[in-house]
Amino acid sequence: MEENIITSVQNARIKHVVALQQKSSLRREEGLFVVEGQREIEHCIACGYEMVEVYLRSQESGDRSQESGDRRQETGDRSLETGVRRQEKTPIATLVTPQVYEKMAYRGSTEGIIAVAKCKAHTLDSLRLTPKYSTDSCLLTPDSSPLIVVLERVEKPGNLGAILRTAEAAGVDAVIVCDPLTDLYNPNLIRASIGGVFSVPTAVCTSEECIAFLKAHQIKILTAQLQDSYEYYDYDMTSATAIVMGTESTGLTQQWREAADAHIRIPMLGRLDSLNVSVSAAILMYEAVRQRKVKK
């Protein structure tokens, strides 16, 4: 560990971390983002992300605070040791005072550890579907019957993060974000995904590029919409399938409706005519999971 400790919130490095938390333009420009918490950082490292800076909250003064600080310090040390084993380039941690840490942290209860990491490329060409519990990558092919979730113009980072979290749980092969209104490394998105943003293969592109990609790989396009549609459980999702979702307010654009192989809907039996997009996506993902388990 370094003996020096950062004590000022005006320190240039601290101000840079805060700016990365707040500004998507800076994240895009520098290709860096901030990740908080032991579990999230360990998962990030395990998924092949490179850490460039690590910060640990220092011990507090006073008997009870000292004891609490010792526990936090030990937590941070264990996290770093895990990271070093998985990634030799993990940097030595820098200590910061509790006041400085509070300034840096985007959320509470992050176990006293924050890191700055390099973003990954999220192009369609970079999509390689990895069988669960395997380290061997395989190219996307119709024979592998991939399940893909496509999201058009989803605006709220929390919704996109929740969808990535569910996609990880459901074993979805890839998520494609079209014409995004938020970036993948928004701190609210990272928090809502509980690290799913790091492990689920994800691409960002235009709708036109995505449609061409899906058709070139012979993946059926199912658009979720209320008009001219089947109830979702009446359509076969066991072959190569892309489930396409739009925003709650406007739904999907016309180009997706025209590109679709079929339109599906979730029955609305109450007075409201729509669900939160993350809830709708979860219902459709797990219907695909159910059908595929039954087919086996």
Image: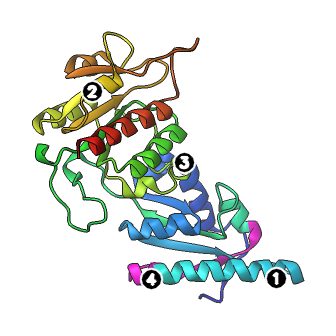
Amino acid tagged 2: Leu
Residue linked to disc 2:
222
Q: Which comes sooner in the sequence, label 2 or label 4? A: 4
**Foreground residue, 248 or 147?**
147
The answer to if 56 sits in the magenta stretch is no
On the question of residue 155 being in view, the answer is no
User: Are dots 4 and 3 in contact, CB under 8 Å?
Assistant: no
- Label 1, label 4: how far apart the Cα atoms are: 26 Å
Dots 3 and 1: beta carbons under 8 Å?
Answer: no
Tag 3: residue type?
Ala
Residue 84, disc: 4
- Answer above or below: position of 163 versus 47: above
Which is in the foreground here, disc 2 or disc 4? 2
What is the secondary structure assignment of the residue under circle 4? Answer: helix
Mark 1 or mark 2, whichever is nearer to me: 2
Q: Secondary structure at mark 2?
A: strand
| Left or right: 66, with 227 as reference point | right
Q: Which dot, 4 or 3, sits closer to the camera?
A: 3
Q: Secondary structure at mark 1?
A: helix
Picture layout, residue 146 above or below residue 109:
above
Image quadrant occupied by the N terminus: bottom right
Name which residue type carries label 4. Answer: Val
Circle nearer the N terminus (3, 1): 1
Q: Quadrant of residue 9?
A: bottom right
Of marks 3 and 2, the one in the foreground:
2
Does the rendering let one see residue 71?
A: yes
User: What residue would you read off at disc 3?
Assistant: 192
Image quadrant assignment for residue 259? top left
